[in-house]
Amino acid sequence: MSQQIAILLASYNGEQFIREQIDSILSQSCTNWHLYIRDDNSSDDTLLIEHEYESRYPQQITVVDIPSVERGAKHNFWLLSQYVLKETDAAYIMFCDQDDVWIQSKIEDTFSAMKSAEQKFQDRRILVHTDLKVVDRNLKVLGNSFIKYRALNPSYTEINRIVVQNNVTGCTTMLSRDLLGKAFELEDVGEIAMHDWWFSLVASVFGHIVFVNKPTILYRQHGDNVVGATKVNSLSFILKRLSGNNHIKKTLHMAVDQAKVFLNTYQDIPLDDRSSLESFAKLYEYSKIQRILTLSKGHYWKQGPIQIIGEYIFI
């Protein structure tokens, strides 16, 4: 395919919303793209709907059949990414969830930021991501800014912050082909927490992360999301995080394990970043007091005061 931008849509039992998502892509102001869809063995009519669109728009949409025993969004997006690297010459890759709606200028705004970043940094390893509007199943706005909704700070792009908590939402991203290729030095995607977090780590160490302070997606919350949006500063969130919930423990262990995988995958990590990653990767070799001191010394902090307090309590 000759289109410059490859859009990857990973689907599973998405018949309720997927038409609206694909229609929003077809309505984009930028048309220099091709949509690649892989279905993860849906039991509803999702695949039938996708083939319907493929037959109507063969120059814009391809449904790919990539057999795999692995299931889940992470594996689905990884297989699609692998396909695009091998079978297309697309220079840029975007990721698409089945149940959102893209604002009409999403591709145009993201691509513009990508080209500006390439000129600014004189680099071909760029990750661009944007804000989102959080909406309910009927597209009623719950929050005009996902970044504020989740108390995230996209200016944190250093590895000591990204390794603890990802602030990049995968369905908003555009990656340069060179960055995606670097990410694929990983041999087994099953070893990492999530594909978009891995891309963020790679961009932090080997490239650049650029944030567009503009919502480009209606991020639909409907109860079945693989990864949803919880309002971080709400009373219910605060009580849940500080009342013995083990979510923070699990995510910290996951982050430490992923740091170990990153260190094992790349031998060309710059010295300062390697030192930071090695210190974090050893976190659970220490006593609790030593873990707290390590967090403080290395600035391995989550984002938002409640998150940080919970991190220190449950480390």
Image: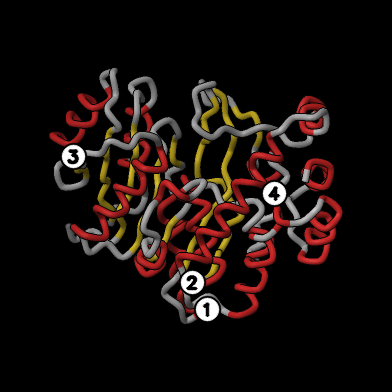
**Quick check: 109 above or below 305?**
below
Tell me, for residue 116, which label it has, or none: 2
Amino acid at dot 4? Leu
Residue 47, horizontal then vertical, whole percent: 23, 27
Residue density around tag 3, few if under 14, some if 14–19, many if 20 or more, within 10 Å? few
**Is residue 155 at all visible to an observer of this figure?**
no
Q: Quadrant of residue 40?
A: top left
Q: Residue at x 36, y 25 (%)?
A: 14
In space, the residues marked 3 and 2 are separated at their CA atoms by 35 Å
Which comes sooner in the sequence, label 1 or label 4?
1
Quick one: which residue is furthest to the top in this view?
44
**Quick check: 142 above or below 265?**
above
Which comes sooner in the sequence, label 1 or label 3?
3
Residue under pointer 4 = 152
Q: Residue at x 56, y 59 (%)?
A: 260
**Are discs 1 and 2 less than 8 Å apart at CB?**
yes
